[in-house]
Amino acid sequence: MAEVHALDDYYLAITLFITIAYQLFFFSIAFTLKFDKLTDFAGGTNFIVLAIITLAFSGHHNARQIVDSLFIMIWGARLSGFLLFRIIKTGKDDRFDDKRDKFFSFLGFWVFQMIWVWTVSLPVTVLNSPNVTKYRQPNFGTGRDIAGVILFVIGFLMESVSDIQKYIFRSKPENKGKVCDVGLFVWTRHPNYFGEIIIQFSIFMIAVSPAAYGYAHGGAYSALYASILGPFFLTLLLMFVSGLPLQERPGAKKRYESGNHWESYLTYTKRTSILIPFPPQLYVHMPTILKRTIFLEFPLYVFDPAKHADQSKVREREAEEGGASSGNEQNHGVQDHA
């Protein structure tokens, strides 16, 4: 089967147009019906659509293309399936409470999702493109291929297992408000993020093999290496935009102001690496400078009660607790007197 040349020889334009159309279709449903259950599903399944289309268009179905395309499809299917299951259980997505009824604010999220899907798909998109498939490739099984497969399996297991562990932990009534410190969360506060980063770099590692082993030249060589923008973009997204910044300091602030297991959370953060898995027995004794550098626990994640807490909320909570405590003491006094 001959390859299909669509707009450009790297499939960049056609995948962008497909992504925009796909996301706008689901956006129209979500906004019109005020329906939250399709948002993350649309993101995850979009990866599957792009991988299938570019692989079908490529006309050259060698093992490397098939494996890399399958990997991103498996990841997208698991991610979208799990998030759909979770939103069905919870009923609505709190992220959109202030956006759901505002056209442009809500659309802004979907535009960002378009950029996320198209950019992260780049390694597979470029690998399946005509300007790469026209070159003879090394047989699948190179050192980079094997390393990529191993990393994918590790990352996929970490992300999948940690999602299940957190869901089970939070679904138990006795764990309401408690810190999830079970399973993989003993080694890192965000094993799902770490697993996702590994997955994307593993897909890039496999995709770049034709260039790394000298089988791609010129523009194809540069395009394969440039597709590292995909895993880098996802890493930056998780570390500086929508991942850790929304989880760490805001989560600590909420716990501190409400007094919700604050001490146990503080103990957990001191002994548990923020992203890179590491034995807690060693991490707790790690110098702060190493935590802030090697282990990526940057100052922007750190919560300082004196700087970041709303002290009025803390005083209100303490006053309520004091009143409740006083009331309990009076009740005990009446019972003792009786």
Image: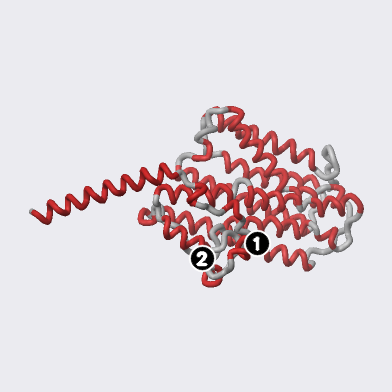
What residue occupies the far bottom of the structure in this picture?
Answer: 281
Left or right: 53 in relation to 291: right
Q: Nearer the viewer, residue 167 or 322?
A: 322
Above or below — where is 169 with respect to 245?
below
Residue 309, position in %: x, y?
Answer: 47, 47
Number of marks present in the image shown: 2
Q: Nearer the viewer, residue 32 or 306?
A: 306
Q: Dot 1, how many residues are within 10 Å of its Cα: few (below 14), some (14-19), or many (20+)? A: few
Residue 198, position in %: x, y?
Answer: 66, 59
Secondary structure of the residue carrying numbered label 1: loop
Q: Residue at x 72, y 37 (%)?
A: 18
Instruction: Name the mark nearer the viewer: 2 or 1.
Output: 1
Q: Residue at x 42, y 59 (%)?
A: 263
Left or right: 256 in relation to 100: left
Amino acid type, callout 2? Arg
Secondary structure of the residue carrying numbered label 2: helix
* Residue 11 appears in view: yes
Amino acid type, callout 1? Thr
Q: Residue at x 84, y 46 (%)?
A: 3
Q: Nearer the viewer, residue 58 or 207?
A: 207
Question: If you read the primary sequence from the N terminus, does the residue marked by circle 2 or circle 1 appear first?
Answer: 2
What residue occupies the far front of the structure in this picture?
Answer: 306
**Disc 1 designates what residue?**
293
Residue 62, position in %: x, y?
Answer: 80, 57
Point out which mark residue 271 bears.
Answer: 2
Q: Residue at x 47, y 54 (%)?
A: 167
Residue 278, position in %: x, y?
Answer: 58, 68
Above or below — where is 48 with respect to 290?
above
Q: Dot 2, how many residues are within 10 Å of its Cα: few (below 14), some (14-19), or many (20+)? A: many
Above or below — where is 105 with respect to 5?
above
